[in-house]
Image (cartoon, helix red, strand yellow):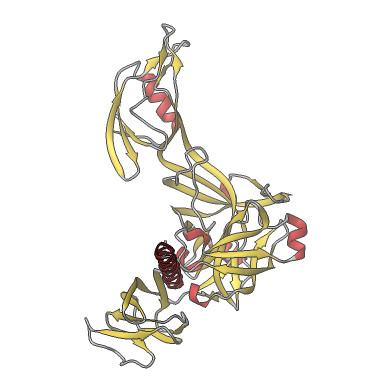
């Protein structure tokens, strides 16, 4: 009997511990690691958990607390009830949250951002980007002039490397690289290479192949093209688009941007999506100076960004809207704006989940297409719709980023605040 009693105690203890850990994790997930608030605007935080926090820094007012605390002082915030917060200037703060006011739960960064208004675009864009240097997409081998297998770059370069310079001369494209290697006639070359955050030099010796050409045994790429959707234009003429970065198709790494251009594009076809098979918007892009919409200055995990022409800004049919921060988003009806080829239009969707603290910044919003017209035309979310702005309660809250492969009617979105802090 004593043995069974011990086993029962162990099971009870284990079950209780698992319950407590699950509760703690649920509370931890209920508070985002970063909370953004708009400068000069009163906002309500309705986290509704049995926890309190200490907010450090000045110029912050919280309802029920002393206003304008002195620098380096802190104020207490009770999250078991709605809290009204007002930040008077753009700054960053630290919030230490404790469960029941005792158990350390999470350190939260509070960022005060400018209260901006954005014009939702939803227009299709043709994208052309040049890499910084040339991107190595593969390492190979070839048959040398003596019939032996040659692989000069093996163990020296790797897929994902960027060749920035060759013998102290800047490399701007693959054609230039090939010509320079050919003209050296087998002399050793020094490449300046970027691999991740590291920049270093390597030396290798080109070898002659069966046709008498000097090669180093690498495949390279220096540009990428595609179709997407512009998310917003701000009052300065800056745009954000896609809601995710442009990755190389072979290495799956974020492409290092040398330069980029936006072009007008015409949607000429739609491949409907279905469960297990994502669809696609097919666009026709004429890479001509007359069709330029703007320039791309940044390619980041949160989207592509740059400046658009005044003509492009004036052609968008929607007015400027306030932004909706993630704590303002509600489950329920919303709209996305996109184009299927005959101008932009708003389509009904439903926000079915809000991931306040998702590690994947491109999947903070989970949505489902409910608009019958859009479902009939596309089957749901398709490639090319990335960047379509999401509107709820008269505010722009995010952008569509991905489709669920197993359910084309559902997909993900990025919070607009994440795009604004790129």
For the C terminus, which image quadrant? bottom left
Residue at (56, 72) in percent of width and height:
396
Residue at (39, 80) in percent of width and height:
39
Q: Is residue 258 above or below residue 9?
A: above
**Residue 150 at x, y percent in the picture:** 40, 16
Residue at (61, 59) in percent of width and height:
411
For the N terminus, which image quadrant? bottom left
Q: Is residue 164 above or below residue 245?
A: above
Q: Nearer the viewer, residue 59 or 227?
A: 59
Image position of 8 (left or right of 188): right
Count of marks placed on residues: 0
Q: Residue furthest front?
A: 1
**Residue 24 at x, y percent in the picture:** 41, 71
Image position of 82 (left or right of 341): left
Q: Nearer the viewer, residue 352 or 70?
A: 352
**Residue 404 at x, y percent in the picture:** 62, 54
Q: Is residue 177 above or below residue 419?
A: above
Image position of 262 (left or right of 407): left
Q: Is residue 308 visible?
A: no
Q: Quadrant of residue 232?
A: bottom right
Residue at (42, 25) in percent of width and height:
178
Q: Quadrant of residue 96?
A: bottom left
**Residue 264 at x, y percent in the picture:** 61, 53
Q: Quadrant of residue 132?
A: top left
């Amino acid at each position: 009997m004593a043995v069974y009693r011990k086993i029962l105690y162990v099971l009870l203890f284990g079950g209780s511990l698992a319950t407590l850990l699950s509760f703690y994790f649920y509370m931890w997930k209920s508070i985002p690691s970063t909370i953004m608030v708009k400068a000069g605007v009163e906002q309500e935080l309705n986290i509704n958990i049995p926890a309190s926090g200490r907010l450090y820094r000045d110029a912050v007012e919280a309802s029920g607390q002393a206003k304008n605390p002195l620098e380096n002082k802190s104020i207490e915030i009770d999250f078991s009830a709605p809290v009204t917060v007002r930040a008077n200037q753009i700054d960053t703060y630290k919030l230490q949250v404790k469960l029941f006011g005792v158990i350390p739960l999470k350190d939260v960064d509070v960022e005060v951002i400018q209260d901006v208004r954005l014009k939702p675009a939803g227009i299709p864009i043709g994208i052309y980007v040049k890499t910084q240097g040339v991107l190595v997409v593969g390492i190979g081998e070839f048959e040398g002039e003596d019939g032996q297998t040659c692989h000069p770059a093996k163990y020296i370069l790797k897929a994902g490397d960027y060749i920035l310079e060759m013998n102290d001369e800047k490399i701007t494209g693959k054609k230039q690289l090939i010509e320079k290697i050919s003209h050296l006639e087998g002399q050793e070359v020094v490449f300046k290479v970027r691999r991740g955050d590291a920049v270093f030099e390597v030396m290798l010796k080109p070898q002659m192949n069966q046709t008498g050409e000097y090669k180093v045994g690498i495949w390279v790429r220096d540009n990428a093209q595609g179709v997407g959707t512009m998310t917003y234009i701000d009052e300065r003429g800056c745009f954000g688009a896609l809601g995710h970065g442009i990755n190389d198709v072979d290495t799956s790494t974020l492409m290092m941007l040398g330069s980029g251009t936006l072009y007008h594009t015409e949607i000429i076809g739609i491949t409907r999506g279905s469960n297990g098979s994502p669809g696609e918007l097919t666009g026709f892009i004429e890479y001509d100076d007359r069709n330029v919409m703007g320039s791309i200055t940044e390619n980041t995990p949160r989207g592509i960004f740059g400046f658009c022409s005044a003509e492009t800004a004036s052609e968008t049919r929607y007015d400027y809207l306030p932004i909706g921060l993630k704590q303002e988003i509600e489950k329920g009806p919303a709209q996305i704006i996109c184009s299927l080829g005959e101008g932009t239009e708003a389509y009904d969707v439903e926000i079915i989940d809000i991931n306040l603290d998702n590690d994947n910044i491109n999947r903070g919003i989970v949505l489902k297409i409910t608009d019958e017209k859009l479902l009939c035309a596309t089957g749901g979310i398709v490639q090319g719709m990335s960047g379509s702005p999401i509107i709820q309660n008269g505010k722009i809250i995010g952008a569509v980023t991905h489709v669920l492969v197993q359910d084309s009617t559902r997909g993900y979105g990025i919070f607009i605040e994440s795009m604004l802090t790129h």
